[in-house]
Image (spheres, rainbow, N blue to C red):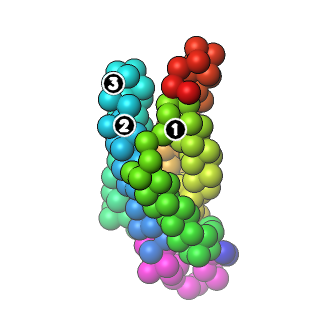
Amino acid sequence: MTPAPEGTAPDYIAINRLLTVCREIELVNALVYEALAEQHHDNATIARIWKQAAREETGHASQIDLAMRIKRGSFTAPAIEQAEVDEALGVAKGVLERVKQEPLKIEHALREAVRMEEHFVRFHAHCACELSDGATRKLFEALRRADEAHVAALVHALEVVTQLGIGR
């Protein structure tokens, strides 16, 4: 999408709707990680990784919510189509349902988590909207870096689990 033409106000309803769905994606991902923590409760290290991931996703949702309330004017235009974000939410909900229905072995769960995170990265708020405010841009840049560290931790855990042959 393109920014509002000069002299016109940004479409805050569309921006809010898009950010609300981005926030919901974060919350659904947190539920996925909480379900995985429960499934793998017998492996303290893996359960801790899942719980940390759930906390991070919940924190991201809170940051999006805060930015929506306090920094509303910083969002100048949606950068992706609403339909794409809605579809991503459907994918997240599908992952959650699969995880709830069928326990995943640790290695498979880590692979799915990495794939899920890589898929959703473009739907995170820092990619979903254009920003005009430097402070808000820095906030979402910090979120992006946290996401990268989060994915790196999942990839590292997957490498260790694969090398040790744990959770197949």
**Residue at mark 3 to residue at mark 2: CA–CA distance:** 8 Å
Disc with the residue nearer the chain's start (3 vs 1): 3
Q: Residue at x 44, y 48 (%)?
A: 102
Residue 46: x percent and y percent? 42, 26
| Range shown magenta | 3-16
Figure quadrant of residue 113: top right
Figure quadrant of residue 164: top right
Q: Nearer the viewer, residue 52 or 16?
A: 52
Q: Return the mark for residue 42.
A: 3
Disc with the residue nearer the chain's start (2 vs 1): 2
- Binning the other alpha carbons within 10 Å of mark 2 as few (below 14), some (14 to 19) or many (20 upward) gives many
Q: Residue furthest right?
A: 2
Q: Is residue 46 visible?
A: yes
- For the stretch drawn in magenta, the main secondary structure is loop
Quick one: SS at disc 3? loop
Q: Determine whether 14 is above or below 46 in the image.
A: below
Q: Quadrant of the N terminus?
A: bottom right
Quick one: SS at disc 2? helix
In the picture of the structure, the residue carrying the numbered disc 2 is 39
Amino acid under disc 2: Gln
Q: Determine whether 40 is above or below 15 in the image.
A: above
Amino acid under disc 3: Asp
Q: Determine whether 76 is above or below 27 in the image.
A: below
Q: Residue at x 48, y 39 (%)?
A: 104
In the picture of the structure, the residue carrying the numbered disc 1 is 109
Does the CB distance between marks 2 and 1 fall below 8 Å? yes
Q: Residue at x 51, y 66 (%)?
A: 90
Amino acid under disc 1: Ala
Q: Does the stretch in magenta take in 107?
A: no
Q: Nearer the viewer, residue 1 or 117?
A: 117
Q: Nearer the viewer, residue 140 or 19?
A: 19
